[in-house]
Image (tube, rainbow, N blue to C red):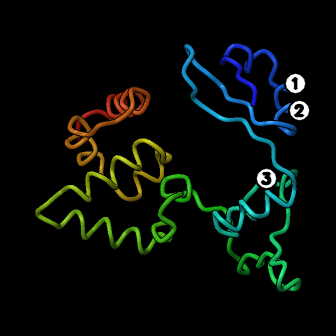
Amino acid sequence: MRFINVRELKSKTSEILRAAAIEDIIVTNHGKPVAVVSGIDGRDFEKIGFRSGVSRVRETPAPYRMEAVDYEKPEAGKPAPAPAGKSAWNPLKAVFWDYPELTEESTLSRRIQEARDSPIQDAFRWYLSRFLERGRVVDAWRFFRLDEIRRIMPSLRLSSRAVAKWTRILEYYGNP
């Protein structure tokens, strides 16, 4: 096991990635371990895909994609084609990557409306903060009104980047 600091990782990335194929490398920041760089081969990649769900292996960018194969059923594991007339790309996956049931637009619309009508606004605030942090502006506008965003945004815990972005947007589109 080898220890390197962040500066060394930045300046010698290729060399370190080659070394990670042989041994685990611990990355430190100010002397404290913060990450482990560990090499994988193709078979390990497939196992990681199965652990994370076969869909993750299929969504891997084309140059790095390996077909998911169930070694006990060699005919299984072939990716299903996208339904005819529908694109496989879904912008809601960027917002709700960890909640696949919310990537369907009709389900999400229903859940947001239920949260909007609820006397307890915690769920509604959660949906709004996810869109403000991770979503595209056009997608946020499909599900939320500008006055809702303006009213609730100051009470949300958002990154400074998201606050700056949405403050500019709200200033540009003015008061209702």
Report the side of 50 relative to 162 (left or right). Answer: right
Work out which quarter of the rendered image holds the N terminus and state it: top right
Q: Horizontal and vertical percent for residue 58?
A: 75, 65
Please determine whether, in this image, residue 133 is positioned above or below residue 90: above
Tell me which residue sits at (34%, 55%) in the image. 127
- In whole angstroms, how far apart are the C-alphas of marks 2 and 3? 21 Å
Report the side of 3 relative to 134 (left or right). Answer: right
Identify the mark nearer the N-term, 2 or 3: 2
**SS for callout 2:** helix
Viewer-side label of 2, 3: 2
Report the side of 62 relative to 28 (left or right). Answer: right
Residue situated furthest left in the rendering: 119
**Residue for badge 2:** 18
**Residue for badge 3:** 61
Please determine whether, in this image, residue 37 is positioned above or below residue 99: above
Q: Looking at the image, do the residues carrying marks 1 and 2 touch, with CB atoms under 8 Å apart?
A: yes
Viewer-side label of 1, 3: 1
* Viewer-side residue, 82 vs 122: 122
Please determine whether, in this image, residue 165 is positioned above or below residue 98: above
Q: How many marks?
A: 3
Tell me which residue sits at (37%, 30%) in the image. 172
Q: Looking at the image, do the residues carrying marks 2 and 3 touch, with CB atoms under 8 Å apart?
A: no
Q: Horizontal and vertical percent for residue 166?
A: 37, 34
Specify the quadrant of the image occupied by residue 77: bottom right
- In whole angstroms, how far apart are the C-alphas of marks 1 and 3? 23 Å
Identify the mark nearer the N-term, 1 or 3: 1
**Residue for badge 1:** 15
Amino acid on which the number 1 mark rests in the picture: Glu
